[in-house]
Image (spheres, rainbow, N blue to C red):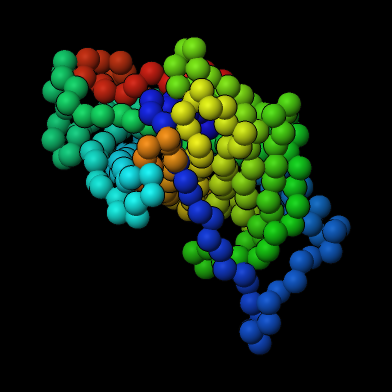
Amino acid sequence: MRYAVWAPVLAVSFAFMVAQTPSGQIEGAPEHAEQERILGLMRAFAEGYVSNLPNFLCDQETRQYEAGKKSKKWHEGDTLTSKLSFHNGEEQRTLQMVNGKPVEPGTKRWRTPLVTEGEFGILLSRVLGPESRASFTWSHWETVREKRLAVFDYNVTKEDSTLTLRLSDLAKAVVPYYGSVYGDPATGAVWRITDAASEIPLALQTREISTTIDYSEISIGEKTYLLPLQATVSLLLEDKKVRNEMDFRAYRKFEAESVIKFGEPGGGEAPKPKR
């Protein structure tokens, strides 16, 4: 996941419910060997995730919210609707509408306080891919959309991190991060993943930043894939809180005759930092 931060930033809480047996007893942790088996399946799933995805299009709706640093009242900002294409493992977005109105070339009358990308595999790869050096510990069982999932907490040190936060070309830093992964114990499929940065330098004017991505089974053509359903990115800045809520819908095939133009005037997407 890549972030571009233009203002000081985010807070997200990870609420969970423990799984219970039919008798109402809390289900205990599996044996160590079983934990390793599940983690192995999850790593295999992550390693092949992007290469197994087809080329596709979908619509991404991003709702922006802000609140005072200590306030619990969120103020709704702009709603951005983009056309997202996934082609040969690369994500591209073209802004189509702002607050339900088509974007006019050459205009920019909205704010983009937070820009993210990478919901389609970057975070999975960073945490569970073959190059990852994340450490994992068992957390709990949880049911997500009627799926009984094994939840592991993970931690990535600064020395092993590939997560870069950027306020400007002069204010950027590689930071450690931590979070949780929710996997199907039978297949290793990841249905939810979270991350949160730590040890953020003061120069970035950001106290906290975190992400939650939820996946669901989506049909494209005649096959079904596990694809992002929704995501939330939250920031706690020096003087306020910022939150983006994203929905991904209307998945369909990227046909050879599909015409997608990127970088046109009025596209409105802020430049994204490089990892």
Q: Is residue 94 left or right of residue 188?
A: left
Q: Which residue lies at the image location 32% right of the left edge and 46% below the top edge?
A: 67
Q: Is residue 3 left or right of residue 110?
A: right
Q: How many marks?
A: 0
The image quadrant where one finds the C terminus is: top right
The reply to whether residue 118 is visible in this rendering is: no
Give coordinates of residue 45: x percent, y percent. Answer: 66, 44
Q: Quadrant of residue 269?
A: top left
Q: Is residue 62 above or below residue 85?
A: below
Looking at the picture, tell me which residue is in the foreground, 11 or 144: 11
Q: Is residue 85 left or right of residue 227?
A: left
Residue furthest to the top in view is: 170
Give coordinates of residue 4: x percent, y percent. Answer: 44, 25
Q: Is residue 153 left or right of residue 262?
A: right
Q: Which residue lies at the image location 44% right of the left edge and 40% below the top edge?
A: 236
Q: Which residue lies at the image location 30% right of the left edge and 50% below the top edge?
A: 74
Looking at the picture, tell me which residue is in the foreground, 156 or 35: 156
Q: Which residue lies at the image location 76% right of the left edge and 42% below the top edge?
A: 135
Give coordinates of residue 84: x percent, y percent. Answer: 36, 32
Give coordinates of residue 149: x percent, y percent. Answer: 63, 61
Q: Quadrant of residue 30?
A: bottom right
The reply to whether residue 239 is visible in this rendering is: yes
Looking at the picture, tell me which residue is in the foreground, 254 or 79: 79
Residue furthest to the bottom in view is: 23
